[in-house]
Amino acid sequence: MEEFLSKEIQAGLAAARRESLRKASRLRLEVDGDVHRVLALWKTGFSIAAEDAPRLRGLVDLYDGGVHLFQCLIVAGEEEDGEMRYEFKRATAVADRAALDFELASDAPAALIEDGRRA
């Protein structure tokens, strides 16, 4: 059906689709204090609006609202349909606590109960 529409109408529809994605997405990217809305996220990368997108590369932080999801090493891909696509070289999930340097037994107690007697 798009082949029957004029170039101006196709451009308008693409812009409206990008704006809808931008408003609906909670995902955002932080780079050196700058914030960019993520339009789409997939296993190997993500995209942001081309008009907002500098040629990013290097270390960035990916958030879902206020939750820090990933610390990513990225490279710029290609621009397609008004979206700049980036590929992950590395995407490390952010943990809420430090990694353990020992094996935690599956039957380990959750807490110790004190009996209340003092010696």
Image (cartoon, rainbow, N blue to C red):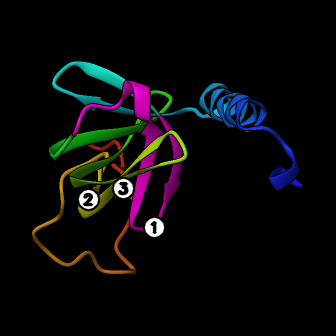
Extent of the magenta region: 38-55
Q: Position of residue 89 (x, y in %)?
A: 21, 65
Is 118 situated above or below 26? Answer: below
Is 109 situated above or below 30? Answer: below
CA gap between label 3 and label 1 equals: 38 Å
Quadrant (top left/top right/bottom left/bottom right) for the C terminus: top left
Q: Which residue is mark 2?
A: 92
Q: Nearer the viewer, residue 53 or 22?
A: 53
Query: Given the image, on which type of amino acid does mark 2 rest?
Result: Thr
Crowding around mark 1 (Cα neighbors within 10 Å: few <14, some 14 to 19, many 20+) is: few
Q: Is residue 117 left or right of residue 103?
A: right
Q: Position of residue 22 (x, y in %)?
A: 59, 29
Q: Which residue is mark 3?
A: 111
Label drawn at residue 32: none
CA gap between label 2 and label 1 equals: 12 Å
Q: Helix, strand, or loop for circle 3?
A: loop
Mark 3 and mark 1 lie on one chain; the one further toward the N terminus is 1
Q: Which residue is mark 1?
A: 43
Query: Given the image, on which type of amino acid does mark 3 rest?
Result: Ala
Q: Residue at x 42, y 34 (%)?
A: 50
> Can the viewer see residue 49 in this picture?
yes
Crowding around mark 2 (Cα neighbors within 10 Å: few <14, some 14 to 19, many 20+) is: few
CB-based contact (under 8 Å), mark 3 and mark 1:
no
CB-based contact (under 8 Å), mark 2 and mark 1:
no
Q: Position of residue 14 (x, y in %)?
A: 68, 37
Mark 2 and mark 3 lie on one chain; the one further toward the N terminus is 2
Is 63 situated above or below 93? Answer: above
